Amino acid sequence: MALTLRPAVAEDFAALYALDQSCFVPGISWSRAELQYFLRYPGNTAVVAEEDGRIAGFAIAGSQLRGGTRVGRLITIDVDSSMRRRGIGRQLLLAIEERLLERKAVALLLEVAVNNPAAQEFYTRHGFVKTGRIPGYYLDRIDALVMEKGLPS
């Protein structure tokens, strides 16, 4: 079974929303309006991983200028629980990084819950380092770690 990566399209919305709801608890998962906003926002990029016509995962990132330098922000990366530990998250992350590099981004930032060690380890394994902490970021009670990775120029 071959995994393919492709840009997200409007027809994917229901499946992406359902996947996001299954990956994160209510209040941490995105609402319908938030997810639609991130998918439609000009300049954001969304990549879908598909296997045999089934969406296995997706990732969304945006970028912004910060002091004249373009920096990417990973908004979400979701992989179907039945398809984890197969490299899909890594492929989605690499695809996002490639798209940000095309936009001349020099770094990629993200937030991850302090009580999600599996995600923290995933990001550390892929070159991210902890650069900060945001108190009460999730559900007004769970802190987020800010992680960052430099992108090659």
Image (cartoon, rainbow, N blue to C red):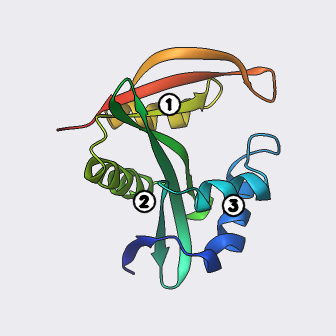
Q: Sequence order check: which comes first, mark 3 or mark 2?
A: 3
Residue 71 sits in quarter: top left
Does the rendering let one see residue 128? no
Q: Which mark is residue 120?
A: 1
- Judging from the image, what secondary structure is the residue with disc 1 in? helix
Left or right: residue 91 versus residue 142 is left
Which residue is the site of mark 2? 88
Callout 1, which amino acid? Gln
Callout 3, which amino acid? Gln
Single out the residue that lies furthest toward the front.
68
Number of other residues with Cα within 10 Å of mark 2, as a class: few under 14, some 14 to 19, many 20 or more? many
Q: Sequence order check: which comes first, mark 1 or mark 2?
A: 2
Left or right: residue 90 versus residue 33 is left
Number of other residues with Cα within 10 Å of mark 1, as a class: few under 14, some 14 to 19, many 20 or more? many
The picture places residue 124, in percent across and down from the top left corner, at 39, 30
Disc 3 and disc 2: Cα gap in Å? 23 Å
The picture places residue 57, in percent across and down from the top left corner, at 53, 63
Question: Residue at coordinates 72% horizontally, 72% vertically from top-left?
Answer: 14
Which residue is the site of mark 3? 36
Does the rendering let one see residue 135? yes
Q: Nearer the viewer, residue 77 or 72?
A: 72
Q: Sequence order check: which comes first, mark 3 or mark 1?
A: 3
